[in-house]
Image: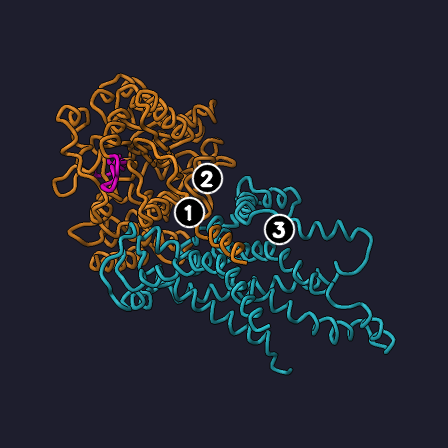
Amino acid sequence: MQNRLLQNRALLLLLLAPSAVATALIALVPVLLLVRMSLSEVSRFGRIGAYVGWENFARLAEDPLLPAILLRTGIWTGSVVAGTMLIALPTALILNERFLGRGLAQFLVLAPWAISVASMAVVWRHALTDEGGLLNRLAVAAGLLDRPIPWLGSVPLSFGFEILIAILVSVPFSTVILLAGLSSIPADIYDAARLDGARAVDRLKFLTLPLLRPFIWIVLIFNIAYVTNSFPIIWILTQGGPANGTDILVTYLYKLAFTFGRLDEAAALSILLLCGLAALTVLMLRTLEHPAHA
Amino acid sequence: MTRLAKIFLILSFGLLPLGSVGAWAADLRFTAGEYSGFTRPFLERVARDYEALHPGTRIQIEVIPWDSYLQKLTTDISSGDQPDLSIVPTMWISDLAADGLLEPLDGLATAEFKAKFIPAFLVPATVKGQLLGFPAAASARAMVVNTELLQKAGAPAPKTWADLATAAKAVAALPNTYGFGLPGKEVEVDTYFYYALWGFGGEIIKDGKSGLASPEAIRAATFYMSLINDKATEPAPTAHSREDIFRLFKEGRIGIIFTYPMLVPQLKTEAPNLKYAVMPFPVETRPVTLGVTDVLAMSSSSKNKQAAWDFLQFLYSDKYRAEFDRAEGLLPVTASEAASSYYKDNPDIAAFAAGLAYARFFPTIKGWPEISDITVRALQTMYLGQKTPTEAMTDAARQIDEVLARR
C-alpha cells in the first residue's frame, strides 16, 4: 500500500514534469531576463550592459508623464471593469431565463468574442473618423449633427470611446463565466424560496448573488488583469495621443521600449506592473477563498 | 509506469532541438521596411533571380511595416537573430553602430563599387570613418497643390509662407473644402513643423541645445496656430493622421499639402482626374526641404558574410535599382540612375529631385526619437488649445535640453 502510494506520487510528478518545464521556460525565463534588464543598462537594440542597480527605477520615478498615466490607467481599468460588470451581470441573468429566441440572443451577445480585439478596434477607428466615418454619416443623415465631429481629435471624447469599446469587448467573456455560474445553481432552491414567499428581488439578493459570488470574483480578477494590459484598442485608435492624453501604462511601456529605445526603463516599468497586478490578484484570490463574513 | 514516464520525458525534452533542420550552404535573411505594396514582391523576385543563379543560397525576405519595424528588429537582435542584411532608416545607424552590430564594408567594397553612388549619400552611413552601409532609398519632400481648387479660389500658387496662408484661407472659403492639410496625429506630426521651422530660418538643434525656444521656432508655431484659428486647415488636426490628409487630398477636398514623392503614383492611380502640381516648399529666408535616406547594412554577426555581400551587389545592379526607385517613387542614389532623363523630364519627379541640392536631414543623435516625441506632444497640446505657441515651444525646448544633457 505504502509502496503503491509512493509510486503514484512519482507518476504524478512525472506527469506534471512536462507542463512544469514548459511553464518555467515560457513564463519564468522571460521574467528573469526582465529582472536582469531592469537592473542593467540596455541599449536600444537590446544589448545588456553594466549593472546599474535601482537607477532605472529611479529614472521612472522622475518621469514627469508617469503620474498622470498611472492615474489614467486606474480610471481605465476601473471604468472598463465596472462597466463590463454592470452590463454582463444583468445580461447573464436575462439569458439564464427561458424565453423565445433565447438561443439567438445568446449567440448575439457572445458572437463578438470570436472577433479579435485588434480587428474590432480597426473597425471602430473607421467608424469614428470624422469625414467618412459611419457614426458621423449616420448622425448627419438622421439630422442629429450639422457637421461631422472629429471624435478622436480630443482627449475626453477619444478616451471615452476607448472605454466604451473596451467594455463592449469584455462583455461576452464575462457573460459566459457568469452564465456558467448561474447554471451551476440548482433550480430547486428557487422553488423552495418561492414556497417560503420570497419575491424575485429577494431571490436575487439572497440566493443568486451570494451563490454567484465566486464567479463574480473570477470575472473581476480576469478582467482587471486583461484590461490593465489591454493594448490594441488604445494603440489602434489614438496611439495614446493626442499629447499622451490617452496613454495608459502598457501603451507608454511600448513607447518607452520601442519608440524611445529605453529598454532598461521599460523593463523596470513592466516589472512594477507585473508586481502590482500579481499583488492585486493574490489579494483578490484570498478574499475569494476566505470571505470576510464566512 | 516507467515506459509511460519515458514517453513523457521524450515528449517534453525531445521537441527542443527541432529548430536546426535542413540548413543550406548559405541561408540569408533580409529585412526591409515596406515602402509600398511593391516592396515585397519586388524583393522576392530579386531573391528568386539570385537563387536561380546561385543554387546553394537560400534567401528569406521579410518586409515589415515601418510602424513595427524597430520593434521587430529589436526583438530579433536581443534574441541573437539579427538579419544578415537589412534596410534601415539612417537614424538607427548610430545606435546600431554603438552596439557593434554592423559590419564595416570598406574591406569588401571595391573602389569601383563605391563609385556607383552619389558621394553625398555615403556620408550618413559612415560612422567614425567606417562605411557601415550603402544608401538604399532617398527621398525628399515637396508641396503639392490642387490647382483646380486654387484657381476656383482665385489664389496663385504660394511662393512664400504668407502666400500659403492667403491661399489656404481662400480655398477654405469654398464650400466643403479645407485650405491646408496639417496632420496632428501619429507619424510625422513634428516633421510638418520642421518644414516651417527651417523655412523661417530656425534649427531643430543649435550648438547642442534645442532650437524650439528661438524666435524663428515660435514664429513657425504661431504660423500653424493662426492657420488653425483662421479655419484654414481641416478641423481638429489632432484627429487627422498624415494618411487621412492624403486621403482628403485625393478626394479633392484639400488645397495644399506637403508630401513625399510616393504620393504621386498614388494620385495617378487613385485620383486620375485630380489636377495637381508639385512645387517647392514656400520660401521665406531660404529654400528648404527634408531629405530622408535609408541604408542597406550588413550584420556583424552574419555567418554568411560573403554570400550576403554578393547578394547586396546583385541588388544594386542598374536594372533592379532603376525598377525599384521608379516603382516606389524614390529619388536616385546611384550616379547612373541620377543621370537618367526620367528624373529631369517628368515635372512631378523633377520638383522632388531638385530639393536634393538643399535638403536638410534629421539630426543623427542618440535620443532623437525622444526629442521628436517631445516636439509632437508640444504641438498637439498647442493644436488642442491647451498651450500658446510660446508656452508650448519653450516647455518643449526645456525638456529637449534635459534629454540632450542626459545622453
Chain assigned orange: B
Q: CA distance from mark 2 to mark 1?
A: 9 Å
Q: Residue at x 37, y 49 (%)?
A: B225
Question: Which segment is the magenta one?
Answer: B283-304
- B217 or A85, which lies in front? A85
The mark found on residue B291 in the picture is none
Label 2 Cα neighbours within 10 Å, binned few <14 / some 14-19 / many ≥20 = some
Q: CA distance from mark 3 to mark 1?
A: 30 Å
Q: From the image, tell me which residue sits under label 3.
A: A113
The mark found on residue B244 in the picture is 2
Please tell me the colour of chain A. Answer: cyan
Predominant SS along the magenta part: loop
Image quarter where the N terminus of chain A lies is: bottom right
**Which amino acid, mark 2?**
Asp
Label 1 Cα neighbours within 10 Å, binned few <14 / some 14-19 / many ≥20 = many
Q: CA distance from mark 2 to mark 3?
A: 30 Å
- B219 or B99, which lies in front? B99
Label pair 2/1, CB-CB below 8 angstroms: yes
